[in-house]
Amino acid sequence: MALEIKKDNRETGQNLLRRFSKAIKQSGILIQARKNQFKKREKSEQMKRKSALRREEKRREFEKIKKLGKPNNK
C-alpha cells in the first residue's frame, strides 16, 4: 500500500503531520503493522518432526517410570 502525502504551498509542518497521521489511520496501514509486529514464524518441517519425536520419547519415558512406580522427578 503506497500512501502519498504532498505538502501544499503555505501549509505548516504541524498541519502536514496531522494530515499524514489521519491518512495513515484511515488507510489501515497502522493496524496491519501492529498485527505483524509480534507475528511468529511457522516451524520448519524438520523442527516439527524433531519436536514430535521428542514428545513421543518423553511420553514413553514417563509411562515407563509410572509402571515402575517411581516418583515423578523433573
Image: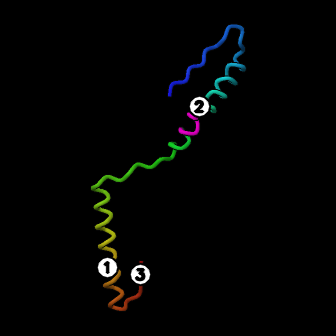
Residue 40 as seen in the image, left or right of residue 21: left
Q: Quadrant of residue 14?
A: top right
CA distance separating discs 3 and 2: 55 Å
Asked if marks 1 and 3 touch (Cβ < 8 Å), the reply is: no
Q: Which residue is mark 1?
A: 61
Quadrant in which the C terminus is drawn: bottom left
Residue 22 picture location, percent across and down: 67, 28
User: In the rendering, which numbered label is found on residue 27?
Assistant: 2
Q: Amino acid at mark 2?
A: Ser
Residue at 37%, 92% (x, y): give it: 69
**In the image as oriented, which residue stretches furthest toward the top?**
9
Residue 68 or residue 56, whichever sits in front: 56
- Report the mark closest to the observer, 1 or 2: 2
What segment is highlighted magenta in the picture?
A: 27-32
Q: Amino acid at mark 1?
A: Glu
Report the predominant secondary structure element of the magenta stretch.
Answer: helix
Residue 52 picture location, percent across and down: 31, 66
Residue at 32%, 59% (x, y): give it: 48
- Report the mark closest to the observer, 1 or 3: 1
Sort mark 2 into few (<14), some (14-19) or many (20+) by Cα contacts within 10 Å.
few
Q: Earlier in the sequence, mark 3 or mark 2?
A: 2
Residue 62 picture location, percent across and down: 35, 80
Sort mark 3 into few (<14), some (14-19) or many (20+) by Cα contacts within 10 Å.
few
Residue at 64%, 13% (x, y): give it: 7
Q: Earlier in the sequence, mark 1 or mark 2?
A: 2
Callout 1 secondary element = helix
Residue 58 or residue 4, whichever sits in front: 4
Callout 3 secondary element = loop
User: In the rendering, which numbered label is found on residue 73?
Assistant: 3
